[in-house]
Image: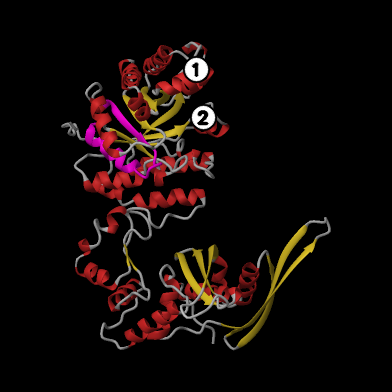
Amino acid sequence: MTSQPSDNNRVYLFDTTLRDGAQTQGVDFSVADKQVIAHALDAIGVDYVEGGWPGANPTDDAFFAKPPQLGHAIFTAFGMTRRPGRSIENDPGLAAVLDAGSPAVCLVGKSWDFHVDVALGIERDENVAMIRDSVARVADRGAEAMFDAEHFFAGYQANPDYALECVMAAYEAGARWVVLCDTNGGTLPDAVERIVSEVAARIPGERLGIHCHNDTGNAVANSLAALRAGVRQVQGTINGLGERCGNADLISLIANLKLKTEYEIGISDEQLTQLTPLSRLLDERLNTHPNPGAPYVGDRAFAHKGGLHVSAVEKDPRTYEHVPPTCVGNQRVIVVSEQAGRSNVLARLRDAGIEVDGKDPRLESLLAEVKRYEFTGATFDGADASFELLARRTLHGMPDYFELERFRVIDEQRFNARGSLVQESEATVQLEVGGEETRQVAVGNGPVNALDTAIRAGLAPHYPQLSEVRLVDYKVRIFTPPEGTGTDAVTRVMIEFAGPNIGRWTTVGVSANIIAASVSALQDGYRYKLLKTGSVAKT
């Protein structure tokens, strides 16, 4: 029978991004990254921040040498129990963790008899003694002791008596938290809830934690199941970062616990609005693009495309939004596409600050233009900047900032003086700005880079603010039009830009020629920047 949550509904949040998250392929935190992320976690109200493993690598050593000064969260060091055949006093690995001086220490140890027999190759009683001795030493030092029972769920299903003996040893030795780990991510929620309930009959739920990996896509569900069964500490990482398929996503857990349950967490309503910025902060530090489909914080989390959906949301957001986007720091997105109706267009125009009467006949013209463009291969789903430019041209007209009259690109492959093979692109453009013509030539590491450099060089004397613009992403898709053949391939290019005061914006260009499609998207990007910064067209 499943245990119900006790009267003590306080759940403690333990973040492992800086240690477990660092095991993600392609992730390598610097000391500066760790400092920034730790302070952000502290600011949002997380209870524990695991900083890493002192003694394991130079980065963690430097981080613990000057630990972050946290106002709320408890800074935690990670390590493992003493090694077999060594005493507590003669284990340099454990000593490095203890000497780091963090107010809390989390030690990992084996709880699966198979691992003890095969991986460690020691007597099972010795493994239990390693757990007991190590946890007791942490407690004796005055630090908050925690034990991560590695592969606990696999171990429990294979040999429940031995798995329980391991966690009981940690509990009896003074562990504040005994954390049950689904290390290979292979357990499903019903098994997690059943097993945790059985453990909670021996160890109070207020002393139990849960640590889940996401190999079956159930890490968040497993964490919630464990909470229902009694645990009161939940571990996870920002954006679900972690080895293989990642860990339980702490972003989703925070939002679910705060908005969907009666559990209490140390995060206020105001702090909750920083959830989306926290998620994006990690992506920025790692130089990766945010997951648009991430629950609560993704760009598509509150995006509405179908016309009927938009009409319903306009009347009552609760019809298609389970929580208000702003409560987690996100925002509603109205997508304009060939599936859009009048309500989509009106909503998107309002978001762009374009006032138009709902009965204005030009709206039909705009909707027809959107559908015509998308039939030929364009998409405004994700290219809001190009849509806004199209809408302004159709409804009110657009300033004539510049005209690209012609361009040419030459690609060259050759051997340089050192005998190395190099590729180089040279772009020539002819522009007309305010009645004046200018011709520019630029070299780049590819045709788009060369064209971007040449066009901006020509526009710089008239619009110096374009020097602030950065190209941050470039996507290409090749496809065949509905009535075409295999030789009629159309290229769609989407370019994402970034710049001060605007943030990020995306444009689209379509042509049978990839360079022409790129040039179209580039020009929309420049024009959007000029429009948003209030630039006046040169006459």
Q: Secondary structure at mark 1?
A: loop
Amino acid type at image mark 2: Ala
Residue 364 lies in what quarter of the image? bottom left
- Residue 234 visible in image: yes
Residue 324 lies in what quarter of the image? bottom left
Q: Secondary structure at mark 2?
A: helix
Tell me the residue that label 1 is attached to. Answer: 121
Tell me the residue that label 2 is attached to. Answer: 65
Is residue 426 one of those drawn in magenta? no
Q: For mark 2, does the 10 Å Cα neighbourhood hold few (<14), some (14 to 19), or many (20 or more) residues?
A: few
- For residue 219, above or below residue 283: above
Does 323 sit left or right of 101 as displayed?
left
Residue in view at x 34 percent, y 87 percent: 362
What is the count of numbered marks? 2
- For residue 223, above or below residue 530: above
The quadrant of the image that shows the N terminus is top left
In front here: 511 or 123? 123
Residue in view at x 54 percent, y 41 percent: 30
In front here: 441 or 297? 297
**Farthest residue in the left direction?**
7
Q: CA distance from mark 2 to mark 1?
A: 35 Å
In front here: 64 or 83? 83
- Residue 430 visible in image: no
- Residue 298: x percent and y percent? 37, 56
Residue in view at x 30 percent, y 88 percent: 361
Marks 2, 1: nearer the viewer: 1
Residue in view at x 47 percent, y 83 percent: 399
What residue span does the magenta drawing correspond to? 207-230
